[in-house]
Amino acid sequence: MIGGTGLENVALLDFRAESIDTPYGRVSVDIGRFGTHDDPIVFMSRHGKGHTVPPHLVNYRANLWALKDLGVRKIIATAAVGSLSSRFKLGDIVLLDQFLDFTKSRPQTFYEGGEQGVLHVDMTEPYCKSVQAVIREAGESLGVSLEDGATYVCTEGPRFETPAEIRMYQILGGECVGMTSVPEVILARECGMCYASIGMVTNEAAGIANHPLTHKEVVESLQAAGKTVAGLIQEAFRI
Ligand code: HPA
């Protein structure tokens, strides 16, 4: 599980903290049990405990390498998102389905030529359908409604967008906006791991909201959704 904003401090049972050295740097995770599920779960806090790493500086390659190294096969990630669409209201929980990539300065691949070779990974279905199906089933069993099929715009951050950018993303088909799913989803695919992401709608995007956006607003709106999503993930692991 990769916990994003609002889910940085999910507590596993009987957990041990572990540091993994990767070619890209050291990564800390907790390994333990989540709910009634017996198989070990790895919990990684994307922004570090206490949210100390901004989205454009997250060491995505180290994170995904470490998970692969630990034998992780399936990932459920969470992401705070702003809404660009009347389909997605504050507090909604959405399954990401496609992405539009507007990041600018992030290494996006493990395959940089030379010894690593060259890989053009398929992105027809960027997010894993089988993990999504399990999350949907978890939603049904808990009575949590999930919005499906969101096209996610990934911006570089850490600033929020201008209203003009948001209008452009809407024209291009973007429905929600965040700062982290790219390159995480791409690197997971390069490692052959099945990756799904649950978006939590924390705000209306800039210019749709009639007030300036703040990180505080995003974190505050996550409090209720964070609990629901943690429960949803726990149930998904049980299934
Ligand atoms: N923009 C970018 N990232 C975000 C937003 C937003 O409006 N809300 C939560 N993460």
Image (spheres, helix red, strand yellow):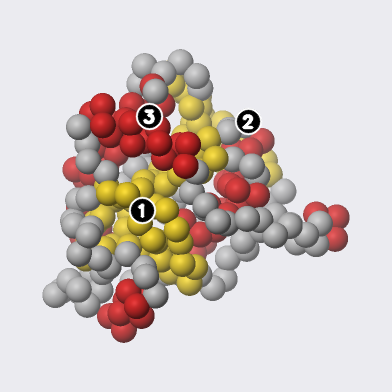
Whole-angstrom CA distance, mark 2 to mark 1, is: 29 Å
- Residue at x-position 30% and y-position 79%: 167
- Residue at x-position 33% and y-position 31%: 137
**Of pointers 1 and 3, the one earlier in the residue sequence:** 1
Count of numbered labels shown in the rendering:
3
- Foreground tag (1 vs 3): 1
* Left or right side of 80 for 204: left
Whole-angstrom CA distance, mark 1 to mark 3, is: 18 Å
- Foreground tag (2 vs 1): 1
Q: Which residue is mark 2?
A: 71
Q: How would you rate the neighbour count of disc 3 (Cα within 10 Å): few for under 14, some for 14-19, many for 20 or more?
A: many
Tell me the element at label 2: loop
Q: Which residue is mark 3?
A: 236
**Of pointers 2 and 1, the one earlier in the residue sequence:** 2
Q: Which residue is mark 1?
A: 149
Q: Amino acid at mark 2?
A: Gly
Closer-to-camera residue (44/162) = 162
* Left or right side of 171 for 71: right
* Left or right side of 118 for 222: left
